[in-house]
Image (cartoon, rainbow, N blue to C red):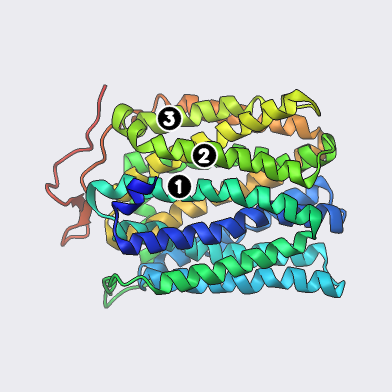
Amino acid sequence: MRESILALNADFRRMWMAFVISGLGSAVTMIALPLIALFILDATAFEIGLLTSMGTLPLIVIGLPAGAWIDRVRKRTVLIVTDLVRAVVLLSVPIATWLGVLTIGQLYVVAVLTGVASIFFGAANVGYVSLLVKGDDLTKGYAAMETGGALTNVVGPAAGGFLIQWLAAPIALVVDAASFLASAVLKGRIRAVEPEPKRSPDRRLSKEIAEGLRFVVNEPTLRVIVTSTAALALFNVMVNAMLVVWLTQNLRQTEVIVGVTYAVAGGLAVVASLFTTRLTARFGHGPTACLAALFSGLAALAIPFAEADWRLWMAMVANGVAMALGVVYRVAQVSVRQRLCPPELNGRMNATIQVTVWSAVTVGALVAGVLAELLTVPTTLWIGAGGQVLVAVIMLSSRLRRVRELPSAAVLNDDGATETASDADVPIKTGR
């Protein structure tokens, strides 16, 4: 990891450090919010599922306009502002807790507002990394970002579990708010000059949104990526939304064990991210993505077997393997889709994918809450893991499996059509 990050430029290293610092706080919050709801507000399993869905619900309403708007402005400004917004919103929870006025309704509002900020952040972040890291280093850059995210998932949840048990869950959100402030400062120190976005004199938001949608729908490989990723996300969130409930209510485990569970997953994700570039070089980006999705789902099938004995540790490792392979999948498919998309459409392409995928996440979280109430939490875990396996099997018969090398970088020609930077007739390199 150290070699790959140092091999890239100083601005990317600042971006990577900001990502890691804010990620540390977010990893704490990932377990802090549902634990606050469970232990301070006595939330039900349905309310936990609803809380998870609230963070993604705004995408359905503003995701596509956000992507079109981001293509009109410099992305670094968006990244800094969204960091500051999330810091302020998260601080409201510990303040309300200390004043004794915290409600589940406020947690829903916090989830929605942080979700709105995350929409703009997500649509700008992926494209901004591709501005800092060029050419064949693109996969290395995304792998380094995933490594950073995996590192935060090792330290953050474990530290959060101890912090929540020894002090109080709201303290974790103070840590997260501080991490977003530090992240904004680091991004402010990036020196690279971002090109001024092209401004069409007859631009209209509706027209620009339609251009992004058309591009995603009409590009065959991108269409496979977005549909597969959305389906995987729907079933994956069913497992993730119920994991804390499963550990704390069904298996009667402490906050520390919850933190250790996520830390184990983060540790395995670090290992996976270090090997992602080698895997894509050896097997190709498409096959790597398909196989990672398959084995991630198979690993998740072991989670419902857990009991409060040695099988708990088996389930922790299985959850870690599933999340680690999820890292491999993300790096492989993001690298492909970024090369398929011209820079002028980057924000709209990423926002379109965000809306599709996170809409699936919203539905999956709500379905998980309903199934947990109507059936059982273990049954919900089984359905989520089994669904991931089914989607991966379908992916193995798609055109994505045949994409071995990254395609040539795409550009828009004078007629607004997409072609490769070197030759409009160069196809995506595939293998049998």
The amino acid marked with disc number 2 is Ala
Q: Which residue lies under the disc numbered 2?
A: 269
- Of the residues tagged 1 and 3, which is closer to the observer? 1
Mark 3, secondary structure of its residue: helix
Q: Which mark is residue 146?
A: 1
> For this rendering, which residue is in front, 3 or 220?
3
Dot 2 crowding, Cα within 10 Å, few <14, some 14–19, many 20+? many
- For residue 414, side relative to residue 371 (left or right): left
Q: Which residue lies under the disc numbered 3?
A: 290
Dot 3 crowding, Cα within 10 Å, few <14, some 14–19, many 20+? many
Give the percent coordinates (x, y) of residue 40.
85, 58
- Mark closer to the chain start, 1 or 3: 1
Give residue 396's quadrant in the image.
top left
Give the percent coordinates (x, y) of residue 355.
51, 54
Residue drawn at x 33%, y 40% as measured from the top left: 220
Residue drawn at x 55%, y 72% as measured from the top left: 181
Mark 1, secondary structure of its residue: helix
- Mark closer to the chain start, 2 or 1: 1
Compared to residue 300, the image places residue 248 above or below, namely below
- Mark closer to the chain start, 2 or 3: 2
- For residue 163, side relative to residue 103 (left or right): left
The amino acid marked with disc number 1 is Glu
Contact, mark 2 vs mark 1 (Cβ under 8 Å): yes
The amino acid marked with disc number 3 is Cys
